Image (cartoon, rainbow, N blue to C red):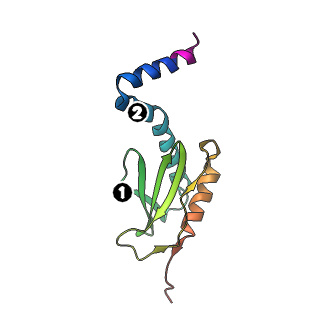
Amino acid sequence: MSHSSLDLECDRLSQAIDRAEFGRLQWAKNEGPMLARLVELAHAALEERSEFALADEGSTSEAKRFVLKVHNSRVVAITISLNGGRPMVQAGEIERSPYRLSEGPPLSADFQQVDDAWMASTLQELFGRVQFQSRD
């Protein structure tokens, strides 16, 4: 029996004994590190822009939610999650922010395609949805 066959049999047995605990372990082994990598990429994309910050507000183990602050002003929420192993990044309006968003779907890709350039492009598109009034 190969090691991968043993892993499959161990997964089958573990899931049969305690489905909920098996799910938590699978999340911690697979999706958890994927989500952590996505968060790293988001922070790295803004690293050289000191006026930008992603403040963690309302995160859970399944989805990381940040408030984008620009010059300490609350602008929009950025939520990073996984859906069936696919990264999902979306923007949402937040309380105490005068800024609105134009509509648009969450942005997603195969995890293998996600890198620094993908995250930068994703954030660029989401930031482009922010609507504000002119301050003439």
Q: How many marks?
A: 2
Marking on residue 23? 2
Kindly identify the residue that appears in the image at 42 percent across and 49 percent down: 63
The spot of residue 34 in percent (x, y) is 51, 40
Q: Secondary structure at mark 1?
A: loop
Q: Is residue 83 above or below residue 31?
A: below
Q: Secondary structure at mark 2?
A: helix
Kindly indicate whether the residue at mark 2 contacts the one at mark 1 (C-beta within 8 angstroms): no
The spot of residue 98 in percent (x, y) is 41, 77
Residue 5 highlighted magenta (yes or no): yes
Task: Point out the frontmost of discs 1 and 2.
Answer: 2
Q: Whole-Å distance between the Cαs marked 1 and 2?
A: 25 Å
Amino acid type at mark 1: Glu
Task: Rate crowding at label 1 as few (under 14), some (14 to 19) or many (20 or more) other CA atoms within 10 Å.
Answer: some
Q: Nearer the viewer, residue 94 or 135?
A: 94
Mark nearer the N terminus (1 vs 2): 2
The spot of residue 14 in percent (x, y) is 40, 22
Task: Rate crowding at label 2 as few (under 14), some (14 to 19) or many (20 or more) other CA atoms within 10 Å.
Answer: few
Kindly identify the residue that appears in the image at 60 percent across and 57 percent down: 120
Describe residue 32's horizontal placement relative to residue 86 as left or right.
Answer: left
Task: State the residue lying farthest toward the bottom.
Answer: 136
Q: Is residue 46 above or below residue 86?
A: below
- Which residues, given as a range, are shown in magenta? 1-6
Q: Is residue 54 above or below residue 99?
A: above
What secondary structure prevails in the magenta region? helix
Residue 47 highlighted magenta (yes or no): no
Amino acid type at mark 2: Gly
* Residue denoted by label 1: 57
The spot of residue 105 in percent (x, y) is 55, 62
Kindly identify the residue that appears in the image at 59 percent across and 58 percent down: 122
Q: Which quadrant of the view contains residue 92?
A: bottom left
